Image (tube, rainbow, N blue to C red):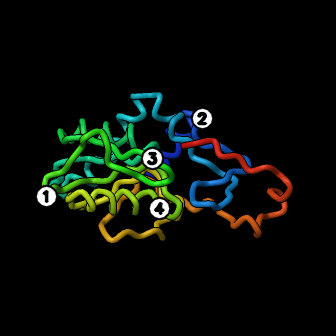
Amino acid sequence: MQNQADEVIDIFRQSGALLEGHFLLRSGLHSKHFFQCAQVCQHMDKVTRLAELMVPLLREYEARTVVGPAMGGLVIAQEVARQMGLRYLFLEKVEDGLALRRNFSFEAGEKVLILEDVITRGGRVVEAIEECRAHGAEPVAVGVLVDRSNGSTQFEIPHHSLAKLSFPTYEADDLPPDLQGTEAVKPGS
């Protein structure tokens, strides 16, 4: 039987979502690999399966709401919320940050789960946690499809990943020879 991380990577490969080339990540780092989750999220059977794998990791937190940070976490967060029977809402990009808009609100102390597609350093997740807290919610856990840091990224609340991988990342001034002189692309999550 296939292990969970292998199944997740297979889903990304089958969807054409695991790209190879020279990429500039949202974190500012460069990489030879990119997870374009939008390619997975157009196939609802695959989204359903990823959520089925995620839900057991998050049930114990007794959250009331699932929050998806724009853009990557929207589809998986909505499906996790559906499978768990919870409310779903999303944060939007405003300038280069995340904001709670559209008259969404939380009750004071409302327990929320943050769902994200891929993390490298976890910056968007930290922003999402802070934005939820700023509006009175209590983030209790984070769920991530793919953790590119191989588990080294930590948050102040528990987090769970379906796959932990270590695809090397590089600072712009420390690129390997095969990436030097090639243009980095930002394909979008």
Q: Is residue 170 above or below residue 80?
A: below
The x, y position of residue 51, in whole percent, is 33, 41
* Residue type, label 4: Gly
* Dot in front, 3 or 4: 3
Q: CA distance from mark 3 to mark 1?
A: 23 Å
Mark carried by residue 93: 3
Assess disc 1: are there few (<14), some (14-19) or many (≥20) residues with their C-alpha within 10 Å of its C-alpha. few
Residue 66 % position (x, y) = 26, 47
User: Badges 3 and 1: C-beta atoms under 8 Å apart?
Assistant: no
In this rendering, would 67 be left or right of 28? left
Q: Quadrant of the N terminus?
A: top left
Residue 28 pos. (x, y %): 62, 60
* Helix, strand or loop under label 4: helix
Q: In the drawing, what numbered circle is on residue 108?
A: 1
Q: Nearer the viewer, residue 184 or 55?
A: 184
Q: Which residue is mark 4?
A: 123
Judge whether residue 113 can be spotted in this image. yes
